[in-house]
Amino acid sequence: MITFYFFNITEFQDLLYPLIELLKQNKKVTIFLFDCLEKKRQFKYYEKKELISYIEEILSINNCDIPPIFHFGQNEKKQYDHVYTSTKPSLILMQGIYHKNAKWIPEIDQDMSKVIHFAWGLDGPYNIERTPYKNITMNVVRRESQMYAYHKYNSKCFGNLRTSQLLHTPINKNINTLNSIKKQNKKICFIPERWIRSKKNKKNVIKVTNDIISYLKKKDYYVIFKKREKGWPYSESYNVINELTEKPDLVIDKDLYYPTSIIFFPLHVDICLFIGTTSVIWDLDEMGMQDKTIIYDYKKDNIEDVKKFIDTNAIKSNFKSDNKKITNIKNKKDLPSKKIINYLLKNIFVN
């Protein structure tokens, strides 16, 4: 039995692809959803039924059987203990191996279950040292350039798993939202939010964001703003969307899309605009989308470069070329997605 552990919505970005592919291999799978955190609690804003329906639609539209899905809330540790003992997972795939603020932590029998840890980034070793799970068989590292930080641990890098979602069939919400946007017959700009790490630069971020959205609107762009999900308790101090005077046309505050909105929508827009840096830039670079990407750099204050880019890219996207990018991903010789599934099946002894 293979079990997927999810503590937050952002963990779906890396783990949904291997979930689907293992189900296509007819492996026995269960899914555990944990709303057990007290801070950075993203599932606070999601209903149990909403999450389960989301997963079921993704699996159904990609021709997978629906496995058992369990949701454990703030006061349901005993229920988890019972289900864990009865399902006896031999392999657990998870990303959230360490949480500073949790109401309870799911216990794992190290003699029964191996753990595959999908690391976030360079903070992975910090989490490995502090996790209660000492039976980690392997760490899956996102980027080859980060492998140096994991030299003390059994770790492998298979490549970018988030972009592998593009190999699957999108759910209806993706298609319906995209079709609705295209009906506006406007140029489209996608802006993924960068989290503000200190209050002192918030005023400047608000000003720059307002200026950029205002300019986009003058140039007749439809603006999509992907809000970064940090979970409950929600802090207005480090988010700008509610304080903007220039409002985007669409705010994605819950990423109930598949493929994830941060990968799917950039394929179908005219430009992707970053106000500061985020990890999404890495994804789009790998997808060969540098020609439609611009970054506002706070240190350089390159607002004129941003406006020039907006002006010169004021032609609607060629959707055939977007499909070509998906084809290019499919035709890669060493797909990260295939490599990790093959490795799991051959080396981690999945039954």
Image: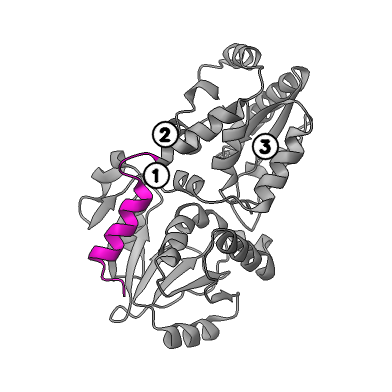
With respect to residue 234, does 262 lie above or below?
above
Q: Residue furthest left?
A: 152
For disc 3, the marked residue is: 225
Q: In the rendered view of the protein, which quadrant contains the N terminus?
A: bottom left
What's under tag 3, amino acid-wise?
A: Phe
What's under tag 1, amino acid-wise?
A: Asn
> Looking at the image, is mark 1 or mark 3 nearer the viewer?
1
Crowding at dot 1, Cα within 10 Å, few <14 / some 14-19 / many 20+, comes out as some
| Residue 236 located left or right of residue 56 | right
Alpha carbon of mark 3 to alpha carbon of mark 2: how far?
21 Å
Q: Please provide percent x and percent y for residue 237.
A: 66, 43
- Label of residue 286 in the image: 2
Q: Which residues are magenta?
A: 331-351
With respect to residue 99, does 301 lie above or below?
above
> Quadrant location of residue 344?
bottom left
Q: Please provide percent x and percent y for residue 193.
A: 60, 38
Q: Is the C-beta separation of discs 1 and 2 under 8 Å? A: yes
Q: Please provide percent x and percent y for residue 14.
A: 45, 53
What's under tag 2, amino acid-wise?
A: Glu
User: Does the segment drawn in magenta span residue 338?
Assistant: yes
Looking at the picture, tell me which residue is in the foreground, 61 or 2: 61
**Residue drawn at point x = 69 percent, y = 35 percent:** 224
